[in-house]
Image (tube, rainbow, N blue to C red):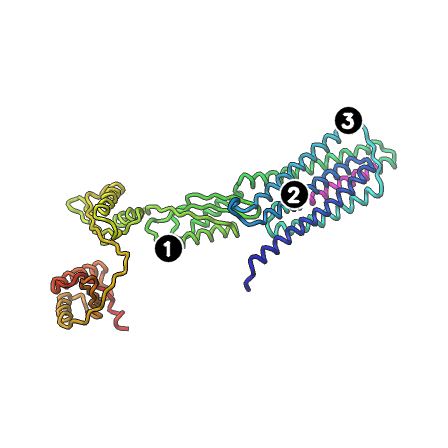
Amino acid sequence: MSTDPQAELHSIQTEKRGVALNSVYVAMIITGSKLWVGLSTGSLGILSEAAHSGLDFVAAVITYFSVRVSDRPADADHQYGHGKVENFSAFLETGLLLLTCVWIVYEAIHRLVTGEFHVKPTVAAFVVMIVSMVLDWWRSHRLKKIAVKYDSQALEADALHFHTDIWSSGVVVLGLVLVWAGERYDVPLLAMADPVTALLVAMVIIHVSWRLARQTIDALLDAAPAGVRAQIADEVATVPDVMEVDRIRIRRAGNRYFADVSVGMSRRVTFQRSEQVVGAVSEAVQRVLPNADVLVRSIPRAAGTENLFDRIRGVATGNNYTVHDVSVQDLGGRIHVEQHLELDESLTLKQAHDVVTRLEAEMKEQIPEVSSILTHIESEPNTVEKGKEVVRDAALEERLRGIVREFPEVIDIHELVLKKVRDLMYLSCHVTMADDLPLARVHDVSTALEIRFKQAAPELFKVLIHTEPQTDNTR
């Protein structure tokens, strides 16, 4: 059952934005509550948590807007989409967390050095901290689920924040319990628990910040995921007709990967086959990076198995020309090449000869063992010619059938058709030969038969002989 891509995209956007907006609301409530009890109790631990939650609120707002922007499709000015906004959002959150650490560490050390401990644990403080832990668990769980589902780095950063908030809040609650115990049982040393727990919270934030910093900086600097390049190279190398993997470049924007792959293919591979190989390479990359946007560049290479004929055709193909009827002779140790070259019929003789001169020079340069080249120039038709079929000529056909009997390889001749095009006579026919006759011999017999037909009927301008195997005519 097919689904509407636009409707599916809208559903994804709605789900991501919804969970991000809920995170904003919860962060605002938690920040306000912690700030209130922190000021009322004078607890540095709670105030540090309030500051932490306040920055989480700012981060949640940034995440919400980054998710909205990152979901926009690519346009003329942002051809890789807007996914980098999520990575940049996560980078900003990292910076905000580090600023929080600086203030917490400074204030905690100041209190430990000066001995100024003025903390009054209250029931409200315990209630606020425990409720905030429950809310942090709920939103981190929701954010993590959606982040994994859609591979969103911004939502994952938020989920990581709020998960660590649970532990840092737990440390603050432990500090409040120790301060309360110190007052109740007259143990002044336990008053130090509040700034100490604040320092522990700072250590947690530093740890989180370091993890986020590594992820976001790698994404912003287009660092390839560890080991992925080697995996792609191994997959692409298994694609038939890929001779080598020349280059692999990977970048990430938001939850989308972009891969740029260059592969070497034999220059004998046709354009159509090249497109098929490119598609197979894209599929190989996507087996490693699902849904990646893959760009594949094919580079023609001279295969080590190429013979002299392949190399000659390869030079011609590289210049976008077609050669056929290539013949190579070893004349006393000197290699001589003869070939037919098709050129646009609109060219003048001078223009065509210049093309041949350049092509022959390049062939000699790339194939040094070739001593001489002789090229027969043919016009490559690009217009449809008008003609008419000629009434069958029984006498001519009988003459031609008599000639066929001179060639023992030819079993029969049939479907003779005479046409007149531009006042010139064209003959086409089908001849049957043995199934196991080598193709080289088939070509020689066909060429000799064509010559004999023209000798017997000088009015023939062009003869086209279609050869068929014997079994094809016995079905």
| Amino acid found under the numbered disc labelled 2 | Ile
Using residue 403 as the reference point, say whether residue 341 is left or right of it: right
Query: Who's the residue at 18% across and 72% down the image?
Result: 392
- Range shown magenta: 159-179
Q: Quadrant of the N terminus?
A: bottom right
Which mark is nearer the camera, 2 or 3?
2
Q: Is residue 5 above or below residue 131?
A: below
Residue that label 2 marks: 62
Which mark is nearer the camera, 1 or 2?
2
Residue that label 3 marks: 113
Residue that label 1 marks: 272
Magenta segment's dominant SS is helix
* Spatial separation of the CA atoms under disc 3 and disc 1: 77 Å
Q: Which mark is residue 469?
A: none
Location of residue 314 in the rendering, given as x and y in whole percent from the top left corner: 29, 48
| Amino acid found under the numbered disc labelled 3 | Val
Mark 2 secondary-structure assignment: helix
Q: Earlier in the sequence, mark 1 or mark 2?
A: 2
